[in-house]
Image (cartoon, helix red, strand yellow):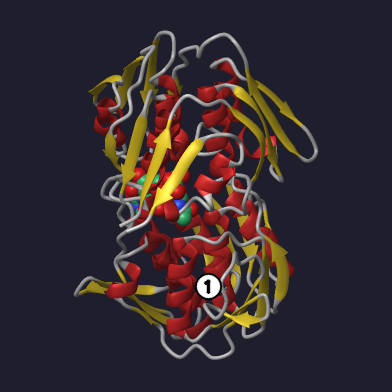
């Protein structure tokens, strides 16, 4: 199993190119199931989760070519991928595939809308709480689907097609908003989603679906209206920049000090997180081409944050911000409101000398002047990168084990950081 070794103490200086967003690429890829035409996606990040979804879509019969080559024929970093779901050969998404990544459950929406049936295994994914699927099932029922669960599988049927209606989310769900929006594109009538997720990835998916011929308005707000159409066509769409990767590197620079330009990204995607990084003492200058992040001299200020659905502070940046706060000049409170068990990084950060106590959904971080390198374990995707951030400031060597978690969501992390002066390398095997 690969590990990542970081020797802390270097400032970061230079340019970091930001990749396409994993959390937009996944639903966009799944949207290819809605049409028998080719959907071409540009700026698709080369990540383990993308590869896993390629396997799942392949299982349903989607023909996938990367930059004109068949997937996995060539090495290198995939950028433009063509998806053609001319014939859907299987409407079953089996446990062996779905259990590896929660987002693969989302195929249920397009399969049901286009084929009138889907049998999808209940999902797995990051171990950050129970993560049920009740909202998906309620929402699909509101679209007219008949649903039952047996043997760990959800069976969904709509032999006469899905129909218009309304669903109001009792709690915001990004994934269930994606699924209802995709499914409703082919419904008979108009479907309205209330209290929808407002994340930029939802708006990006709607933009692509509209380019495919869907009639969606309001995506990016809490009220989305989808007028059903009889079929969708192909399209070409560029995946928006990864706001979580952007925020992660902004926090890394705030941690080490230095001057880095985050290229091909936009501050509008993560205002709340950038405000927190600014409050911690970094200078943030958004430009048309990206975001400049600097911190010189003075130390890191303690900042309290609480995660929230967009436009609030993203839960996917909570671990990284805690990593930054371990080295602040005072006490910071970090509250997690989205997932119930998203503090597994706490005990690993403690191995580096962090002082953190937990009470319910709030972590109290007493900043320390010195972190010290150690062996640590990546527990999930975002937690693992918080250990890298802390390692960048720790004295001596930090080795992060189980970096396959990192590879699920961060493209060329060690290369991007070492190009800016960090002492970081992957140890294979
Ligand atoms: C997506 C993101 C993930 C991010 C999360 C919250 C992708 C691929 N993943 O995950 O990185 O951390 O949004 O911003 O885009 N819930 C229910 N019932 C349901 C569905 C969700 O109770 O049927 C709960 C979840 O357990 C969680 C909360 O709702 O507590 C939010 O989850 P959700 O927004 O659905 O997260 P994902 O879409 O899985």
- What x and y, as percent, mark residue 103? 42, 61
- What x and y, as percent, mark residue 196? 53, 49
Q: In which quarter of the image is residue 42?
A: bottom right
Q: Name the residue rendered at 63%, 81% in the picture.
A: 69
Q: Name the residue rendered at 46%, 13% in the picture.
A: 302
Q: In which quarter of the image is residue 331?
A: top left
Position above or below: 93 against 15: below
* Residue topped by disc 1: 163
Q: Is mark 1 on a helix, strand or loop?
A: strand
Q: Nearer the viewer, residue 193 or 75?
A: 75
Q: How crowded is mark 1: few (under 14 residues within 10 Å), some or many (20 or more)?
A: many
Residue 170 visible, this angle: no
User: Which corner quadrant holds the C terminus?
Assistant: bottom left
User: Which corner quadrant holds the N terminus?
Assistant: bottom left
- Residue 170 is left or right of residue 34, and the answer is left
Residue 41 visible, this angle: yes
- What x and y, as percent, mark residue 231? 65, 81
Q: Name the residue rendered at 41%, 82% in the picture.
A: 117
- Residue 152 is left or right of residue 262, and the answer is left
Disc 1 within 8 angstroms of ligand 1 (CB): no
Q: Name the residue rendered at 49%, 36% in the picture.
A: 423
Q: Nearer the viewer, residue 12 or 29?
A: 12
């Amino acid at each position: 199993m690969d590990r990542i070794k970081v020797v802390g103490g270097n400032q970061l200086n230079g340019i970091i190119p930001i990749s396409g967003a994993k959390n937009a690429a996944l639903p966009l890829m799944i949207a290819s199931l809605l049409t028998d035409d080719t959907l071409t996606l540009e700026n698709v990040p080369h990540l383990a989760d993308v590869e896993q979804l390629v396997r799942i879509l392949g299982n349903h019969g989607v023909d996938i070519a990367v930059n004109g080559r068949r997937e996995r024929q060539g090495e290198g970093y995939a950028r433009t991928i063509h998806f053609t779901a001319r014939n859907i050969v299987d409407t079953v998404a089996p446990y062996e595939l779905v259990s590896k990544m929660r987002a693969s459950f989302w195929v249920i929406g397009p399969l049901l809308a286009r084929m009138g049936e889907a049998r999808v295994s209940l999902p797995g994914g990051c171990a950050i709480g129970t993560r049920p699927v009740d909202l998906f099932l309620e929402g699909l029922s509101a679209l007219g689907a008949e649903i039952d669960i047996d043997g760990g599988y959800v069976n969904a049927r709509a032999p006469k097609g899905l129909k218009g209606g309304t669903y109001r989310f009792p709690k915001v769900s990004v994934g269930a908003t994606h699924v209802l929006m995709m499914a409703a594109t082919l419904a008979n009538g108009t479907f309205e989603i209330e209290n929808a997720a407002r994340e930029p990835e939802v708006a990006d998916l709607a933009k692509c679906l509209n380019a495919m011929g869907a009639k969606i308005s309001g995506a990016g707000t809490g009220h989305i209206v989808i007028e059903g159409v009889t079929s969708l066509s192909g399209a070409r769409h560029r995946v928006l920049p990864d706001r979580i990767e952007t925020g992660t590197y902004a926090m890394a620079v705030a941690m080490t000090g230095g001057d880095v330009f985050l290229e091909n990204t936009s501050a509008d995607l993560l205002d709340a997180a950038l405000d927190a990084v600014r409050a911690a003492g970094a200078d943030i200058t958004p430009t048309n081409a990206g975001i400049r992040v600097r911190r010189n001299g003075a130390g890191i200020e303690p900042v309290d944050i609480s995660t929230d659905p967009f436009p609030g502070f993203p839960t996917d940046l909570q671990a990284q911000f805690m990593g930054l706060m371990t080295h602040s000049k005072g006490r910071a409170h970090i509250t997690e409101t989205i997932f119930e068990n998203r503090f597994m990084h706490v005990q690993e950060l403690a191995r580096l000398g962090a002082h953190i106590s937990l009470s319910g959904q709030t972590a109290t971080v007493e900043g320390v002047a010195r972190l010290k390198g150690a062996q640590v374990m990546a527990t999930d995707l975002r937690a693992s990168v918080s250990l890298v951030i802390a390692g960048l400031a720790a004295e001596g060597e930090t080795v992060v084990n189980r970096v396959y978690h990192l590879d699920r969501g961060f493209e060329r992390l060690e290369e991007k950081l070492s190009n800016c002066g960090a002492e970081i390398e992957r140890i294979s095997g």
